[in-house]
Every structure is written in structure tokens, then in C-alpha cells.
Image (spheres, rainbow, N blue to C red):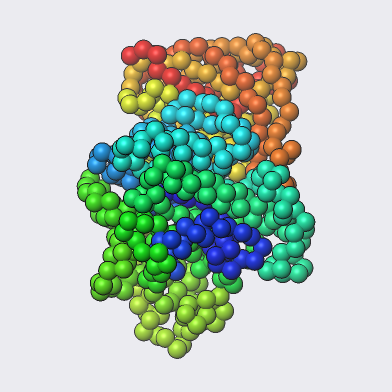
């Protein structure tokens, strides 16, 4: 199951984009079934929640893309668990974006193997810091190539066993980084399907995104070739889709909306499903489908029992993919983000402002038909109002009382990043987008960083910090506390690398730049199970600052 990040419906040559060549994805689509109208959420974490659980993301506790709001509730059963129970070897390689600490971590959600990162975006795509089953490692080369390599290696190791591989790639999400091989094709390319007066920065952003999509296509080709080489292609189901609309102004088939929008262009995605043994080539499905349909659909196709889940919102699309002659009832799909609600039926869309559009005649949503279709308008309005009344009232940060878990009984390692922390005093975040940010301007004894935490298991824990500090500022004494437990240590080694990322960016980024943070052993601390505030503060600052702080890595060393 291959998922791209911020690739729009229009970023494929199959769909009519004349600037791009995606021959491998196009062949994948034509070799199996393709859904003409497949829908995801307006942004990435809700889509992931829906495909992983088979349920609308609002039910699962997901309301944001960072700072804990991306976590799928621990009592939800995920697709990895469904297939693992059935005897499959399971793996996830890439951008998880559904929770970092246990019980939200992919290794806690049914995936035997995980390699990638758990945040919503990453700050560097060339040999970056990544995670392998809880331990921090360094990636190997361009991240999309690296993740694909891991997927192919996993498949090669499990040729004789059933496997479920989830490959959530993190491109073409910004920062816009792509190797020269693909960028050189696009850096001066004329894009004739864009407005002639588009500004240079947006033009280069579109060029970079298309270059990243061609790199994805190359990797899809390598993956399909590996299945051929291993003689697995005939009986392996391959799924390809995207997590939301395009992340910039580029051609998207004339649809209104882009990433973040509940309009058609923000939520329509390709969905291609190839299974040579059962799905006929060039099968086109015209009925609407959604990301939450993937869990029941894939389980149905594979003959895997779905058990232990909460009631699913998704339905199995298997009869449509297998071209079985079945009666298919009308259904309604609700798209929601930041309080905006849109409803899609087979033919119509009600937008978040209450305007009704006939999507067959007006795919660009240019002319509302409220007066011409009053009965249809009333029907879709009723669906939207019921959703607002039943699901939205207790949805959002104000109702999230889930602490970040340290030392879950099933976990050895726990990451506590700056992303999830709350700065106090004059401490600043390196960027307004928290996901791959760090804290800086830590200059006062009144400054601190806190996390609302719960220790899952009492024990002794080793604490490591990832930091930078100029030579002139070493010597600060810092304290880590949780309830009555205290640990103090001193910053004794200088490490002052420059900011990184801009050297690889094809367009000026909006996210934080990154650094090569140094790993420092702070010591061990005894933590008792229970809730409390994890707090990091300075007891002594001999010079101008304490450090720049990226994350803590906490490991249970004794019960």
C-alpha cells in the first residue's frame, strides 16, 4: 500500500498532466482497477487515521497535524493489527504521522517493522536522522529512495510468507528537496497548464513538486520490478493513492481547492489497485470511495477476518474491483477540517458554505444549483448537520486530555521531542510549524520546557538529550523533573553546527531548518508510574544561553 504525501490528483500523466511523465504509476493503474472518484481528507493525518482504522478521523481523536492532535486513539484497531493477527508479516516504511510514543507508535499498532519518522513533516531529505523500531539512526541517501529500498528488502526477506507492507512516502511534501537527476529536467521547464502570470516562487514550487513526483514514479517502478523478479507480482495486491490535494498552485484537472480544502480538488485522490490474479486490467470503478474503505476492502480481498475493530464507517469495495454484478447503494461521504464540513454524494457536492454543485456538469464548482435541486440540497444539508451535531461538539484540542506516555510497558525507547513540548519564559520555537522544530533562546533560569506526561511503568530510565551549544556557552546545569523525581546534569561539550536544509531546497521553505544535533547522556532517573509534568529547566547559566534543544530519548534500563 503506497501512499504519497501532498501529491494531487493532477500530478500524473495518466490524468492529463502534460508536463510530467509517470509511466510506472500509469501502467499500474491500467493493469488493474482505478477509481474515478476516490476521496481522502483535506490534510495528511486525518487521511492516515481513516485508512488505518476504516473509520472517519473525527471518531479517532485526530484533530491536528502536530503536538499530539495527530494521534489515533489507542483503543482503535489498525489495519496492521488486522493483518498481523491473520499471520502476515507487517511493516511500515516512511511518514507515520499517527503518534510517536507508545501506545501510538507503529510498532504498537500491528507493524513488526518500522523505519522512517513519526512527525508530520521532516526537515531534511538527504540521509537524515530517522527511526528504526524506536532507535534513532541515519538514513541512506534521498529519503524516498531509501524508504523504497527498505520495502524491497523486507519483501525479499519474506518471499515465503504473506506480508503487508505500508509505504507512506513523504514527498512531494515540503521542504521541496529532490535530487539533481529529476530537478534538472524541470528547473527551466515551461508549464503550459498553469496561469501565465504565476509568480516565480510558485512556478518553481510546482516544478519541484513535479520533479518529486517523477522520483516517486521511478521508485514505484523499482518496487514493481522487484515483485516481478521475486515472482510475486501475480498474487500481490498493490495499492497506490495520495493523502490530500496538491500542496501548491499547479494543474489539478480544473477542480476547485487544494490541500487543506474540503472542496473537490482538496480531497480527490487517485486510487489504483492491481492484482493480476483476480482484478481484470483496465477496470474502471465509477462509484465513489474513500480512504476509510481500504481496511475492509483489502481484508475482504485477502480473505482476512476483520475483528476487534470499532464499527467501521468504510465499506468493502471488493465487489467493484472484481467487477461483480452487485447492486450498489447510494452513499454520502463527509469531508471535514477545521470546522468546515462538505458532503459528497455520487453526483453532488455540498460545500462548507452551503452551496450545492452538480459535479457531473460542473466539476470545477462554478455554479451552485441550490434553487434547481432543493430536495437534493435538503438531503445533503441534513447529512452535514447531523455530522456537526453528533461528531464535532467534542472534537479538538480543548477536549484532548491524552498525556504523552513515557516508558510504556511494551516500549524500551521513548522519544520526547520539542514538537510536543510547551515553552515557558523567553524560550522560542525555531518555526511556527512544530513538527521538526527545536527550541532556542533559552537564556534565563525562569525559562523551562514542559510536557504533559504519563509514566506507563515504574523503573529506572536513562535520559539522553539532543542539543547544540557554542563553546562560549558550555557549563549550564540543567534539571529534569517529573513529580518528585529529579535528575541534574551539565552541558560540558561544545557542539555548534550551522543550520542545514537550505543547501538542498529548490524553493525557500516555510518549515524550520534543522541542525546536526549532538547526543548527550544526562544520566538516569527513577520514575514512578502515573501522570505528571515532565519539566526541563536550568539551575545555572554561566554564560548567555543554555542550549538549543531538539529532543529527549528515554530508555528503561531497570524495572
Report the side of 133 relative to 427 (left or right). Answer: left
Q: Is residue 478 above or below residue 272?
A: above
| Residue 474 visible to an observer of this rendering | yes
Residue at 40% over, 13% down: 557
Judge by depth and name the residue closer to the eye, 42 or 115: 115
Residue at 69% over, 37% down: 501
Say which quarter of the image contains residue 541.
top right
Report the side of 176 relative to 337 (left or right). Answer: right
Residue at 69% over, 18% down: 495
The x and y percentages for residue 255 are: 56, 71
Report the side of 180 relative to 234 (left or right). Answer: right
Q: Which quadrant of the figure contains the C terminus?
A: top left
Judge by depth and name the residue closer to the eye, 228 or 438: 228
Judge by depth and name the residue closer to the eye, 39 or 524: 39
Residue at 30% over, 61% down: 318
Q: Is residue 227 above or below residue 277?
A: above
The x and y percentages for residue 24 are: 53, 55
The x and y percentages for residue 240 are: 46, 54
Q: Residue furthest bottom?
A: 372
How many marks the image carries: the answer is 0
The x and y percentages for residue 130 are: 54, 31
| Residue 337 visible to an observer of this rendering | no
Amino acid at each position: 500500500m503506497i501512499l504519497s504525501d501532498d501529491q494531487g490528483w493532477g500530478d500524473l500523466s495518466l490524468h492529463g498532466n502534460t508536463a510530467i511523465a509517470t509511466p510506472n504509476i500509469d501502467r499500474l493503474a491500467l493493469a488493474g482497477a482505478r477509481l474515478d472518484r476516490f476521496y481522502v481528507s483535506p490534510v495528511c493525518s486525518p487521511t492516515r487515521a481513516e485508512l488505518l482504522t476504516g473509520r472517519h478521523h473525527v471518531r479517532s481523536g485526530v484533530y491536528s497535524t502536530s503536538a499530539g492532535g495527530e494521534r489515533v486513539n489507542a483503543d482503535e484497531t489498525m489495519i496492521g493489527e488486522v493483518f498481523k493477527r491473520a499471520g502476515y508479516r507487517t511493516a511500515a516504511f516512511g511518514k507515520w504521522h499517527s503518534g510517536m510514543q507508545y501506545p501510538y507508535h507503529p510498532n504498537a499498532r500491528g507493524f513488526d517493522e518500522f523505519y522512517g519518522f513519526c512527525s508530520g513533516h521532516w526537515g531534511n531529505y538527504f540521509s537524515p536522522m530517522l527511526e528504526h523500531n524506536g532507535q534513532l539512526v541515519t538514513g541512506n541517501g534521498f529519503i524516498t529512495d531509501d524508504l523504497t529500498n527498505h520495502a524491497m528488502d523486507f519483501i525479499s526477506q519474506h518471499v515465503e510468507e504473506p506480508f503487508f507492507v505500508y509505504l507512506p512516502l513523504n514527498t512531494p511534501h515540503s521542504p521541496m528537496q529532490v535530487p539533481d537527476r529529476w530537478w534538472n529536467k524541470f528547473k527551466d521547464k515551461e508549464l503550459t497548464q498553469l496561469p501565465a502570470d504565476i509568480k516565480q516562487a510558485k512556478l518553481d514550487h510546482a516544478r519541484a513538486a513535479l520533479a518529486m513526483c517523477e522520483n516517486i514514479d521511478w521508485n514505484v517502478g523499482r518496487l514493481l520490478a522487484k515483485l516481478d523478479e521475486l515472482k510475486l507480482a501475480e498474487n500481490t495486491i498493490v495499492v497506490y493513492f495520495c493523502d490530500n490535494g496538491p500542496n501548491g498552485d499547479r494543474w489539478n484537472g480544473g477542480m476547485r481547492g487544494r490541500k487543506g480544502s474540503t472542496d473537490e480538488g482538496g480531497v480527490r485522490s487517485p486510487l489504483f489497485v492491481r492484482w493480476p490474479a483476480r482484478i481484470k486490467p483496465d477496470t474502471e470503478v465509477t462509484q465513489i470511495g474513500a480512504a476509510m474503505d481500504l481496511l475492509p476492502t483489502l481484508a475482504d480481498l485477502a480473505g482476512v477476518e476483520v475483528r476487534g475493530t470499532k464499527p467501521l464507517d468504510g465499506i468493502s469495495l471488493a465487489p467493484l474491483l472484481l467487477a461483480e454484478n452487485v447492486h450498489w447503494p447510494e452513499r454520502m461521504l463527509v469531508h471535514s477540517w477545521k470546522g468546515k464540513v462538505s458532503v459528497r454524494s455520487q453526483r453532488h457536492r455540498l460545500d462548507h458554505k452551503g452551496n450545492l454543485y452538480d459535479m457531473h456538469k460542473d466539476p470545477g464548482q462554478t455554479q451552485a444549483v441550490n434553487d434547481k435541486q432543493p430536495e437534493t440540497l435538503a438531503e445533503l444539508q441534513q447529512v452535514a448537520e447531523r455530522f456537526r451535531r453528533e461528531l464535532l461538539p467534542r472534537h479538538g484540542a480543548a477536549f484532548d486530555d491524552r498525556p504523552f506516555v513515557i516508558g510504556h510497558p511494551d516500549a524500551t525507547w521513548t522519544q520526547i521531542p520539542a514538537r510536543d513540548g510547551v515553552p515557558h519564559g523567553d524560550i522560542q520555537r525555531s518555526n511556527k510549524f512544530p513538527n521538526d522544530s527545536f527550541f532556542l533562546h533559552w537564556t534565563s533560569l525562569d525559562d523551562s520546557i514542559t510536557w504533559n506526561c504519563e509514566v506507563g511503568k515504574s523503573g529506572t530510565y536513562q535520559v539522553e538529550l539532543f542539543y547544540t551549544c557554542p563553546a562560549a556557552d558550555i557549563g549550564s546545569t540543567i534539571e529534569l523533573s517529573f513529580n518528585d523525581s529529579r535528575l541534574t546534569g551539565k552541558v560540558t561539550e561544545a557542539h555548534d553546527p550551522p543550520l542545514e536544509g537550505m543547501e538542498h531546497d529548490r524553493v525557500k521553505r516555510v518549515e524550520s531548518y534543522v541542525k546536526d544535533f549532538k547526543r548527550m547522556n544526562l544520566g538516569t532517573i527513577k520514575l514512578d508510574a502515573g501522570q505528571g509534568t515532565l519539566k526541563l529547566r536550568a539551575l545555572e547559566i554561566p554564560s548567555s544561553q543554555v542550549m538549543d534543544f531538539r529532543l529527549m530519548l528515554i530508555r528503561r534500563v531497570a524495572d
